[in-house]
Image (cartoon, rainbow, N blue to C red):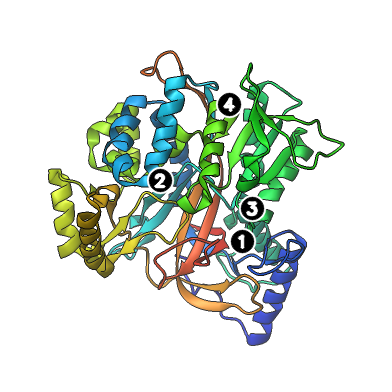
């Protein structure tokens, strides 16, 4: 895609020069993670690519153009009770315990009466380039891998990696290359854009003395992707953000019995903060996996927060909207997309990014999916209703996995297979290389790679709590930045935090 070899071949001495400059810049500018086995006072540089990666400009611009459509689509799904009841409340909630518990919370709070009609979405739509048997970038397409409605991470670190690559170019560390120009390195405002989304929700809440609560995992390694949002909020918007591990909220959160305000009372009060402190917005950077709920107390905490008048990012309804089953239904049932997107032109724009998607149920489509899963498994990936990487079953592993699942289902008397979807694999261009620098390593590894583009979007919506059939009022709908993750072609999974990918930035090509 560059017209000449990429990345440039460097002498051993020159590559070490670039590596040294990159490592120093990363440590000096907060492009870091906590080590697996170290205290909170230690850090190592995050995984990054030594060079930016070529990405066709027209596909990058297409992904950006589509984000407001996707933002609006998932805002409407979030507010459509009947659709969520049908899609998630059907087989998925009955065979997937995690989705079932989220669904039960959603139903319970709906029955009691929603205390906060506003919800904030910091979304990310992830794409791969699809290029089967195509040699010209003009024929490449982008296909959606998934749509994330909870804990869309790496906004801050992706901004930093783009800055790192621009620094290496401006400083003269990179060799001369016709494609490597300042105009090809697109600015990435993800950090400021996501922070502005948080600020917009806080301001809509209407209490300047309240604070934003970021819910994190225990022993969080990714603090340096989260802290910059805290700093941006206080420095640019004058808003306090508290980062609190999920497990510590068991004893520190409460509801005001008359106003339903969410109150935070720290175990060790700080003289500079009121106690209790009202929370305007709860921003989850955890709670997307069963393992994030360490005990039943975390489920009680989630219910408490949903019952409050704090704005949620996401609300439990918005988290359900991001289920893989919803993605499958939108792709395999044309009437589902028509329900939410009235413009035929917009529907076609979205459908161009869909892959083949199938249910794993007793329907005719489900029977066809089962046949394909066994007879054409090399073309497919089997996905559960999970986020965070490392959960999918690929290619030849699908038939034996389904066999084991069928045996377990017989023994347990359930049909867990219905909680999965079948998705055709996206075939990225071949022959793409990159130098991958893993976390804490001083040397790079040149590898044949695949890059996945994520586009960040912000939505602030207000549901009509008196009419479940009414469309939501969309107060904010913006595209705010991007993330490029690059991995060795031998790896199917793409998570950065779990060690599969590095953070990259696009070098736009014509």
The disc at residue 73 is none
Tell me what residue is drawn at x 36 percent, y 60 percent.
392
Mark 1 / mark 3, whichever is N-terminal: 3
Q: Quadrant of the N terminus?
A: bottom left
The disc at residue 181 is 1
Residue carrying label 4: 308
Image-based side of 505 in relation to 381, left or right = right
- Image spot of residue 371 (x, y percent): 14, 57
The one nearer the camera, 110 or 482, is 110
Image-based side of 242 in relation to 36, left or right = right
Q: Secondary structure at mark 2?
A: helix
The span from disc 1 to disc 3 (Cα, nearest Å) is 18 Å
Tell me what residue is drawn at x 71 percent, y 32 percent.
211
The span from disc 3 to disc 2 (Cα, nearest Å) is 33 Å
Mark 2 / mark 1, whichever is N-terminal: 2
The disc at residue 98 is 2
Tell me what residue is drawn at x 53 percent, y 48 percent.
295
The one nearer the camera, 331 or 388, is 388
Q: Is residue 190 visible?
A: no
Mark 3 / mark 2, whichever is N-terminal: 2
Residue carrying label 3: 159
């Amino acid at each position: 895609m560059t017209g000449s070899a990429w990345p440039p071949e460097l002498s051993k001495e020159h590559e070490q020069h670039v590596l040294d400059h990159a490592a120093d810049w990363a440590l000096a500018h907060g492009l870091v993670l906590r080590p697996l086995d170290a205290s909170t006072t230690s850090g190592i540089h995050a995984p990054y690519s030594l060079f930016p990666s070529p990405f066709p400009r027209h596909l990058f611009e297409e992904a950006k153009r589509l984000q407001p459509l996707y933002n609006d689509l998932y805002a409407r799904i979030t507010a459509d009770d009947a659709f969520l009841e049908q899609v998630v409340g059907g087989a998925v909630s009955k065979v997937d315990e995690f989705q079932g518990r989220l669904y039960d919370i959603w139903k319970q709070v709906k029955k009691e009466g929603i205390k906060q009609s506003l919800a904030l979405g910091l979304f990310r739509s992830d794409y791969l380039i699809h290029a089967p048997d195509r040699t010209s970038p003009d024929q490449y397409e982008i296909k959606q891998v998934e749509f994330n409605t909870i804990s869309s991470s790496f906004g801050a670190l992706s901004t930093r990696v783009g800055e790192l690559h621009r620094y290496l170019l401006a400083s003269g560390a990179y060799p001369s290359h016709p494609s490597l120009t300042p105009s090809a390195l697109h600015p990435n405002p993800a950090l400021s854009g996501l922070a502005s989304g948080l600020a917009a929700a806080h301001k809509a809440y209407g209490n300047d003395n309240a604070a934003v609560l970021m819910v994190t995992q225990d022993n969080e390694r990714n603090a340096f992707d989260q802290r910059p949002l805290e700093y941006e909020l206080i420095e640019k918007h004058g808003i306090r953000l508290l980062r609190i591990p999920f497990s510590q909220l068991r004893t520190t959160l409460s509801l005001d019995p008359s106003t339903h305000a969410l109150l935070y009372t720290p175990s060790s009060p700080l003289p500079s903060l009121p106690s209790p402190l009202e929370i305007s917005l709860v921003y989850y950077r955890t709670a997307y996996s069963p393992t994030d709920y360490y005990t039943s107390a975390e489920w009680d905490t989630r219910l408490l927060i949903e019952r409050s008048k704090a704005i949620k990012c996401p609300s439990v309804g918005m988290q359900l909207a991001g289920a893989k089953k919803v993605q499958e239904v939108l792709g395999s049932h044309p009437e589902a997309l028509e329900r939410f997107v009235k413009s035929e032109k917009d529907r076609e724009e979205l459908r161009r990014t869909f892959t083949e998607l199938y249910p794993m149920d007793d329907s005719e489509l489900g029977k066809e999916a089962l046949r394909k899963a066994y007879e054409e498994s090399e073309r497919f990936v089997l996905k559960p209703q999970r986020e965070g990487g490392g959960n999918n079953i690929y290619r030849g592993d699908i038939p034996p996995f389904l066999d084991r699942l069928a045996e377990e289902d017989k023994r347990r008397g359930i049909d867990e297979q219905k909680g999965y979807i079948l998705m055709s694999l996206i075939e990225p261009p071949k022959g793409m290389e990159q130098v991958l620098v893993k976390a804490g390593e001083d040397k790079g590894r040149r590898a044949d790679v695949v890059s996945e583009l994520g586009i960040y979007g912000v939505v602030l919506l207000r549901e009509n709590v008196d009419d479940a059939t009414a469309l939501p009022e969309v107060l904010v709908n913006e595209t705010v930045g991007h993330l490029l993750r690059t991995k060795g072609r031998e790896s199917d999974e793409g998570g950065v935090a779990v060690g599969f990918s590095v953070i990259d930035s696009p070098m736009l090509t014509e």
